[in-house]
Image (tube, rainbow, N blue to C red):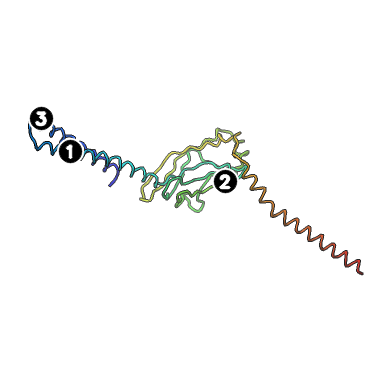
Amino acid sequence: MSPIITRIFLGLTLLVSIAVACFSFQGIQSGQNEAWATLAASLAVITSVVSAWGAQRVVELEEQKLEPYPYPHFDLTSHPGLIFVKITNFGGGPAYEIKLSWDSPLKDSKGDEINFNNSNSSGELAILLPGQYISRFVDGSAGLFEREGNHIYKGNIKFKDGKDKDRSCQFILDAGSYKKSPLFDNEVLKTHRELQKIPGLIQSLAEKVEEIAQQLKRDQDVDKI
């Protein structure tokens, strides 16, 4: 049963129960003893309906947590100096047949429109699981901000939920808000990049030591001769 039908049913039940309680109260005033039992039953039903209304709201909130919510956004932090656009499913359920429609097409550094599924002529993504994302390269941060305009991109994203129901929502992306803004809260990413250089430096050092060892061995062989 859909939430709307459930609420209508609970609302009608509440109205009927209130009406019965009013008639029962009138019966009590006119001296009808059996009206007390009817009034008590009506009040019990009203209490149950109020409790059921709150429980229904809790169920709806839990169902909303399981709904898919794919949304595009810019990513300037995962790769320093580069801008990516991502579609991330922030919801609790898988999203199917995801399609973006831009009011003004977002283009990459080559001037090509961003397409999240190059193998599909419609540009649809078949599925995005909860927490999953798909990213596409847009441009270097300096290159994008050199373009004229306010760097605000709007559009509509359409998708289907697990019940094959069509859904859509408007989206707004603002790359200009990142201009002249610090993109990193700490130096963790920079430190990680520097640490990645250590294996290469160790390899170079090992090769140099090996060259020195071979040179010393050759010198020793010459001295023996």
Among numbered discs 1 and 3, the one appearing first in the sequence = 3
Outermost residue on the bottom side: it is 225
Name the residue rendered at 48%, 37% in the picture: 172
Of helix, strand and loop, which one carries label 2? Answer: strand
Would you place residue 94 above or below residue 24 in this image?
below
Residue 111 shows in the view: no
Q: Residues within 10 Å of mark 2 (few under 14, many from 20)?
A: some
Picture quadrant of residue 7: top left
| Residue marked by disc 1 | 42
Amino acid at the residue labelled 1: Ser
> Do labels 3 and 2 touch, CB within 8 Å?
no
Q: Describe residue 188's horizontal placement relative to residue 222 as left or right.
A: left
Dot in front, 3 or 2: 3
Q: CA distance from mark 1 to mark 2?
A: 64 Å
Residue 137: image tag? 2
Residue 6 shows in the view: yes
Horizontal and vertical percent position of residue 96: 42, 50
> Do labels 1 and 3 touch, CB within 8 Å?
no
Q: Residues within 10 Å of mark 1 (few under 14, many from 20)?
A: many
